[in-house]
Image: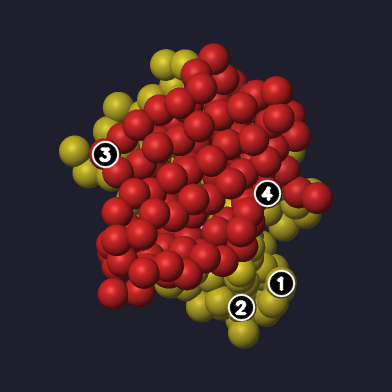
Chain colours: A yellow, B red
């Protein structure tokens, strides 16, 4: 049973470009979470999704950031018109959703975004 | 101060010694989880302790939870060089995890 998969592992973008980060949850998991980790800091919650639904996006910046988890395929975190401050490690986690609010979340290896 | 604040921020010990890390939180929790992160890598789930539990063991790990003080501790016994990593507590309130800043543990061989 493969773990949470994220790609790419490293992504370099110039200011103003778009970044698309992908996350495939563990097999059997229907809940996906995105977190951002700035250098030397802990992880900060961004968004929580189920298939085709955004459940909680209270941690998402109001502009330029969007997330989706379609019926088929991976979850996508999209950052438009990237700025240097978007440089960070972005982690995806998944859970089975049996006990909403109490599930263990399993993390992927992260995507390290560098904005030049 | 931030939720899920770990103490100390950094800890350096010799192999074989025990390491204790503390975490304080502010909200009412469903459970509290501890994770490890090796440098430049993803997070590995270590242990989950529910709000109605006071102590939990897993191998060389022992976690305690004191809901009256809103604090938790992680004890790693007989540490190994491979335990060198950052350790985070994360409180679960609702569906999100709220992480602290972490404790950087260095185990010297």
Instruction: Please tell me whether mark 3 or mark 4 is closer to you in this view.
Output: 3
Q: Give how far apart the Cα atoms at labels 4 and 1 are.
A: 24 Å
Residue under label 3: B59
| Marks 1 and 2 share the same chain | yes
Secondary structure of the residue carrying tag 3 is loop
Badges 4 and 2, same chain: no
Q: Position of residue A17 (x, y in %)?
A: 62, 73
**Mark closer to the chain start, 1 or 2:** 1
> Badge 2 local density, few (<14 within 10 Å), some, or many (20+)?
some
> Which quarter shows the C terminus of chain B?
bottom left
Mark 1 touching mark 3, by CB under 8 A? Answer: no
User: Mark number for residue A115?
Assistant: 2
As drawn, the label of residue B47 is: none
- The chain containing the residue under callout 2 comes to A
The residue that appears at 27% across and 33% down in the rendered structure is A27
In-front residue for pair B12/B87: B12
Looking at the image, residue A102 lies above or below residue A116: above
Circle 4 chain: B
**Residue designated by label 4:** B5
Q: Secondary structure at mark 1?
A: helix
Question: Seen in the image, is B26 located left or right of residue B81?
Answer: right
- Identity of the residue drawn at 40% across and 28% down: B56
Measured as percent of width and height from the top left, residue B60 is found at: 30, 44
Q: Where residue B2 appears, x then y in whole percent?
A: 76, 49
Q: Which residue is mark 1?
A: A85
Q: CA distance from mark 1 to mark 3?
A: 40 Å
**Do tag 4 and tag 2 residues touch (Cβ < 8 Å)?**
no
**For the point 58% across and 36% down, which residue is it?**
B72
Residue at (71% x, 30% y) in the render? B69
The subunit letter for the residue under badge 3 reads B
Mark 1–mark 2 distance (CA, rounded to whole Å): 8 Å
């Amino acid at each position: 049973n493969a773990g949470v998969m994220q790609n790419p592992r490293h992504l370099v973008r110039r200011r103003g470009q778009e970044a698309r980060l992908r996350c495939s949850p563990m097999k059997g998991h229907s809940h996906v979470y995105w977190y951002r980790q700035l250098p030397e800091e802990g992880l900060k919650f961004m968004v929580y999704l189920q298939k085709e639904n955004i459940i909680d996006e209270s941690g998402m910046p109001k502009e330029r950031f969007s997330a989706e988890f379609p019926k088929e395929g991976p979850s996508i975190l999209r950052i438009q018109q990237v700025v240097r401050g978007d440089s960070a490690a972005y982690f995806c986690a998944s859970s089975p959703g049996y006990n909403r609010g109490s599930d263990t979340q399993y993390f992927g290896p992260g995507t390290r975004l560098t904005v030049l | 101060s931030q939720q899920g604040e770990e103490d100390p921020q950094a800890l350096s010990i010799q192999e074989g010694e025990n390491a204790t890390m503390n975490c304080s939180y502010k909200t009412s929790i469903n459970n509290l989880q501890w994770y490890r992160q090796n440098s430049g890598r993803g997070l590995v789930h270590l242990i989950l302790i529910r709000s109605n539990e006071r102590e939990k063991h897993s191998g060389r790990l022992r976690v305690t939870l004191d809901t009256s003080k809103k604090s938790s501790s992680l004890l790693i016994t007989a540490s190994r060089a491979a335990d060198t990593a950052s350790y985070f507590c994360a409180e679960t309130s609702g569906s999100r995890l709220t992480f602290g800043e972490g404790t950087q543990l260095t185990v010297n061989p």
